[in-house]
Amino acid sequence: MNNTSEQVPVTVLTGFLGAGKTTLLNRILTEQHGKRYAVIVNEFGEQGIDNDLVVDADEEVFEMNNGCICCTVRGDLIRILGGLMKRADKLDAIIVETTGLADPAPVAQTFFVDQDVSDKTKLDAIVTVADAVHLSNQLGEHHEAEEQIAFADIVLLNKIDLVDENSIDKVKARIKKINPYAKIVKTNRCDIPLNEVLGLNAFSLDRVLEVEPDFLDSDHDHEHDDDVTSMSFVSETPLDMDKFQTWFGNLLQTHGQDILRSKGILSFEGKDDRYVFQGVHMLMDASPMGTWPEGKERNSRVVFIGRNLENMGLDDGFEGCKLN
Amino acid sequence: MSDREKFLEQKISYLEPEETELEGRGKELEINAPVTGAVTIPEAVVAGFGDGTVRFFRSEETPKIIDAHDGVVLCIATNGSEVFTGGDDGRFLQISPDGIITEIANFGTRWVDTVAATKDNMVCSSGKNAYLWSSGNTKEKILEHTSTIGGMAFDRSGKRLAVASYGGVTLWEQGNRRWKSSRLVWKGSHSKVSFSPDGKYIVTTMQESELHGWRIRDKVDLAMRGYPAKIKSFAWVGDIPHLATAGDHQAICWPFDGKDGPLGREPVCVADCGKKISTFIEPLTGEKAIFVGFNDGTVLLSEVDDRKNPFVVRNPKGYEISAISLSSDRSYILIGDLGGNILWSPLWAN
């Protein structure tokens, strides 16, 4: 039972060292916005942030013994968010900075797994700051760079004054290939209004309803196995609920480690409600979200971002859920 | 919902509007900050708050307010006479019964997450290190661990310190010249930790909704599972003790008598409160009975006997119970919740 207050939104800020995370954090802490933000920084992160509401953290990734092999959480985050929630003065938002080499999954999973964290706070969005000059190289060299793009709800393509238009287009295409659903904003010194990075509510199931599958990039044959890509599916035919649950459950069990993010809106035979889900690896949040709007066509839309998506039999699996 | 659950739900809601005996004769205070913990010293019950204050409650007096931390009082402990606190301002403080503050250490932007004390030792943790001050030594000893410390506890002798972290418990034993460590291993993240009163067992709460225990002598593992929620509180009750635990719709009391403790035995389940989840357990000193606080603010008093009915001590106020403490002479009780509501009441009718 929690009637204490609304959940405090938590924004996760990722990006490689030197991309400009600290610039953004300093803006969040110093700009006159009349809001109280707490910032959780990593002790090995960039220097130069000093403020009452800055909390030092060690990134401690815990494995959970809940039978889910890729279920890891950030132990330090559970502890620190718990402490921040006991403050007498209420916070408007919390920003969690991760180190450049961190996988964003454990941070996101913490909000699915820990009851106190999910009662009192909510994951707002994953914001990735990318260096327009170096991102292409980083994507080739580090899994983590790909993951940070793959998980992003918004990518700040920073330092664009240092690259020409042509290069910007190339790097944008690269980002789109990994994650067509992230919003890309070109910035210099992270000069973006703060309300475009904070308070996005990107993890709410409401927002999943806005997801439009990407049809342009449906050719996945030529990718390297390890590359992060996305796949999407649409069906005008209603789905069979039992079949979908069986298929999807199995899919997450067997390929959850390779599926970084998934989301979808589902139209089930015999159900008036729209069913919406969104997941991180094996963990999922799902709920009916009201009836289908009058006069609009009912269709199911599912998107996946991950590795080795071509080898999961997604096409056949999704096809098999359709009502015969 | 079973018939029994339905019945209890009705019974509890029926009781809600009526003022309890303790509410009737006690004082209700609204502090604008969550209660984060409370301890008992001979002169007072001392509670810590989310606004950095520590308040001393003494019988009929107005509580004395001490501005201790610049932030949240994250943890509070006592050595029987003085109070020790750690805060998110990075300070480890000793507070005398008169409210005089001595700063023992300051870790700056690193929080002081846990504290523990005995007559001869005081220890705090910040991150992965425990900092231990022993009487006779001015310089602290640093006890290093491989992950952030979730909880610490001394045994009754004060010569052993259990430190819980990721992957198990580090058991520190005071030798003639130094503290030696050994490790009790169990996969997962451990937080609260406690020795059984006879010193034979160590028990921890875990990030998973379960408890883990070890018989220290042979490191036999005791897994205590089946909880619907994380266990936020436990306490030893009675001479041949039960470990009474929160994290369920009632209090789950594991028997620690006999040679093998709870190994292969069923717990006693008392103070059923329908769908609510218990969040705090405090023994009624000298009796085989416990106060059980719930996530909606209800507090029940129950004997550790599943044939007896509990009774309502405090009605729900909508906030999770985060502290229950009895005065040293058992004449007063303090009940606090995360909404900053305090009930300070004489325990017995005149």
Image (tube, rainbow, N blue to C red):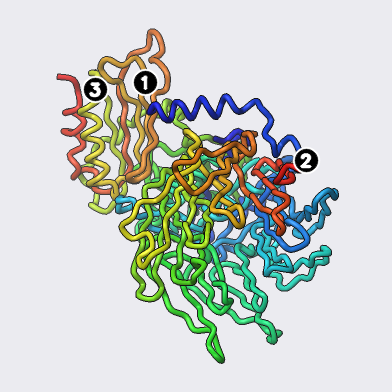
Q: Is residue B115 visible?
A: yes
The answer to whether residue B30 is left or right of residue A80 is right
State which quarter of the image contains the N terminus of chain A. top right
Q: Amino acid at mark 2?
A: Lys
Q: Position of residue B5 (x, y in %)?
A: 43, 30
Q: Is residue A196 visible?
A: no
- Both labels 2 and 3 in a single chain: no
Which residue occupies the extreme front position in the image?
B350
State which quarter of the image contains the C terminus of chain A. top left
Q: Amino acid at mark 1?
A: Arg
The alpha-carbon separation of the residues under discs 1 and 2 comes to 51 Å
Residue B67 vertical position relative to residue B118 in the rendered view, above or below = above
Residue corresponding to mark 1: A274
Question: SS for tag 2?
Answer: strand
The crowd level at tag 3 (other Cα within 10 Å; few <14, some 14-19, many 20+) is many
**Chain of the residue under label 2:** B
Residue placed at 59% from the left, 52% from the top?
B282
The answer to whether residue A93 is left or right of residue B188 is right
The answer to whether mark 1 and mark 3 are in CB contact below 8 A is no
Q: Position of residue B198 (x, y in %)?
A: 49, 70
The answer to whether residue A17 is left or right of residue A315 is right
Of labels 2 and 3, the one closer to you: 2
Determine the image quadrant of residue B101.
Answer: bottom right
Residue A239 — which label?
A: 3
Q: In this view of the protein, which residue sits in the foreground, A292 or A225?
A: A292
Q: In this view of the protein, which residue sits in the foreground, A32 or A220?
A: A32
The alpha-carbon separation of the residues under discs 1 and 3 comes to 12 Å
Of labels 1 and 2, the one closer to you: 2
Residue corresponding to mark 2: B27
Question: SS for tag 3?
Answer: loop
Give the mark, 1 or 3, whose residue is nearer the N terminus. Answer: 3
The answer to whether mark 1 and mark 2 are in CB contact below 8 A is no
